[in-house]
Image (spheres, rainbow, N blue to C red):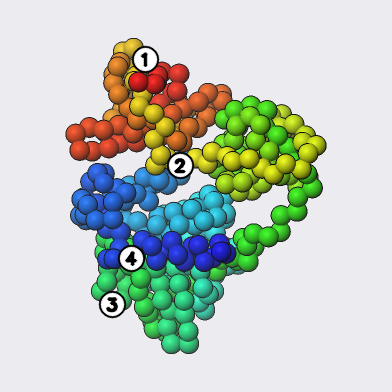
């Protein structure tokens, strides 16, 4: 399946059965219907924030939703290239596209569509000479542009609708897999070896000692370009790879999944352990749960990250009553329960 089709399918998934509904608080963010309200809390903002980008929780989220989908399919680096650093603002997206030659007056399947002088954004699912079918976040089933409607929906507009400002074209052909040219294999020499989207960039997943990966001969600095089964094409620290002489296929890898619990943990730090928005002491603490106390229980999720000093930080889930909060804690201060 092409990346374009995956993108379109993801939009249809979140628009199905009445669509994903925004929440009145940060509870049940992953559920399509529970805790529905009009305070602009969404899973999309939470995830974007956890990726180290401006999540803008409790703010209008039409652009955040499109960015979230692009990251899921193409990765953060490509999503930022398409939408720009101001991806959360439709005017900024428009200006970025105009500056980079991707702004057009005609539709294209998979393109972003900007409405009403930069007040709303969706994407084109399909089109013909009469109109366009879109997938949008923070809208409603009402006809026309609804820029703060609280749901993910598929909608239709006339091709000449005056509310349409223009389109941000995406070159999906660049992202179709099939150009990979294997010249050999290498083997991981350590456990928990990260596979990154770019050298020292976003973590796609990790592999363990003995895992065999394909290589295409590309390197940059101390990084090797590699293809990992179950994760995809990324970059691995060369110093933790050995040349492989056999033609043994790649072994099963452990792809990171922040929704998957690794184990129940207990805080060993005294008297408290800070909970931060990302891995590193330079990042702020959570507003709702800034710290945990000695012997507090947490759930450790499958999304361990490293800070600038390469120390591990656990991504943890904290339950308070019926609410769940997520953040990062230094791994050395959490033990298995």
Q: Work out whether residue 291 can be spotted.
A: yes
User: Which quadrant holds residue 288?
Assistant: top left
Sequence-wise, the earlier of marks 3 and 1 is 3
Could you tell me how far apart the alpha carbons at marks 1 and 2 are, in whole angstroms? 26 Å
Sequence-wise, the earlier of marks 2 and 3 is 3
Could you tell me how far apart the alpha carbons at marks 4 and 3 are, in whole angstroms? 17 Å
Could you tell me how far apart the alpha carbons at marks 2 and 3 are, in whole angstroms? 37 Å
Residue drawn at (59%, 41%), measured in percent from left and top? 252
Which of labels 1 and 2 is toward the front? 2
Which of labels 4 and 3 is toward the front? 4
Q: Which residue is mark 2?
A: 257
Which of labels 4 and 1 is toward the front? 4
Q: Is residue 133 left or right of residue 169?
A: left
Q: Which residue is mark 3?
A: 143
Which of labels 2 and 3 is toward the front? 2
**Label 1 packing within 10 angstroms: few (<14), some (14-19), many (20+):** some
Give percent across and percent down for residue 320.
22, 32
Which of labels 3 and 1 is toward the front? 1
Could you say which is closer to the camera, residue 332 or residue 124?
A: 332
Q: Is residue 200 above or below residue 91?
A: above
Give percent across and percent down for residue 155.
35, 74
Q: Quadrant of the C terminus?
A: top left
- Secondary structure, mark 2, is strand
The numbered dot on residue 269 is 1
Could you tell me how far apart the alpha carbons at marks 2 and 4 are, in whole angstroms? 23 Å
Could you say which is closer to the camera, residue 13 or residue 252?
A: 252
């Amino acid at each position: 399946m092409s990346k374009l089709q995956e993108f379109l399918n993801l939009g249809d998934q979140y628009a199905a059965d009445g669509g994903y509904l925004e929440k009145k608080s940060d509870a049940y963010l992953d559920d399509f219907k529970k805790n529905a309200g009009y305070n602009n809390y969404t899973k999309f903002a939470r995830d974007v924030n956890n990726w180290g980008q401006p999540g803008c929780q409790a703010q209008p989220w039409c652009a955040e939703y499109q960015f979230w989908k692009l990251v899921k399919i193409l990765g953060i680096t490509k999503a930022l290239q398409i939408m720009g650093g101001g991806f959360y603002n439709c005017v900024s997206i428009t200006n970025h596209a105009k500056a980079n030659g991707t702004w057009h007056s005609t539709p294209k399947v998979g393109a972003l569509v900007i409405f009403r002088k930069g007040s709303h954004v969706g994407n084109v699912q399909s089109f013909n000479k009469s109109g366009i079918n879109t997938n949008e976040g923070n809208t409603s089933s009402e006809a026309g542009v609804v820029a703060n409607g609280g749901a993910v929906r598929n909608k239709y507009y006339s091709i000449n609708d005056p509310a349409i400002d223009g389109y941000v074209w995406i070159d999906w052909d660049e992202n179709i897999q099939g150009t990979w040219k294997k010249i050999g294999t290498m083997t991981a020499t350590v456990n928990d070896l990260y596979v990154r989207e770019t050298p020292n960039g976003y973590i796609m997943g990790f592999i363990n000692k003995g895992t065999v990966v394909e290589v295409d001969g590309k390197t940059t600095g101390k990084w090797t370009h590699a293809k990992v089964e179950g994760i995809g094409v990324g970059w691995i620290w060369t110093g933790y790879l050995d040349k492989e002489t056999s033609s043994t296929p790649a072994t099963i890898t452990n792809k990171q999944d922040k929704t998957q619990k690794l184990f129940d943990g207990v805080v060993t730090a005294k008297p408290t352990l800070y909970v931060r928005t990302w891995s590193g002491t330079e990042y702020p603490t959570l507003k709702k749960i800034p710290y945990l106390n000695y012997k507090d229980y947490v759930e450790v999720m499958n999304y361990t990250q490293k800070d600038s000093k390469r120390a591990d930080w656990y991504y943890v889930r904290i339950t308070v009553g019926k609410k769940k909060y997520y953040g990062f804690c230094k791994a050395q201060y959490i033990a298995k329960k």
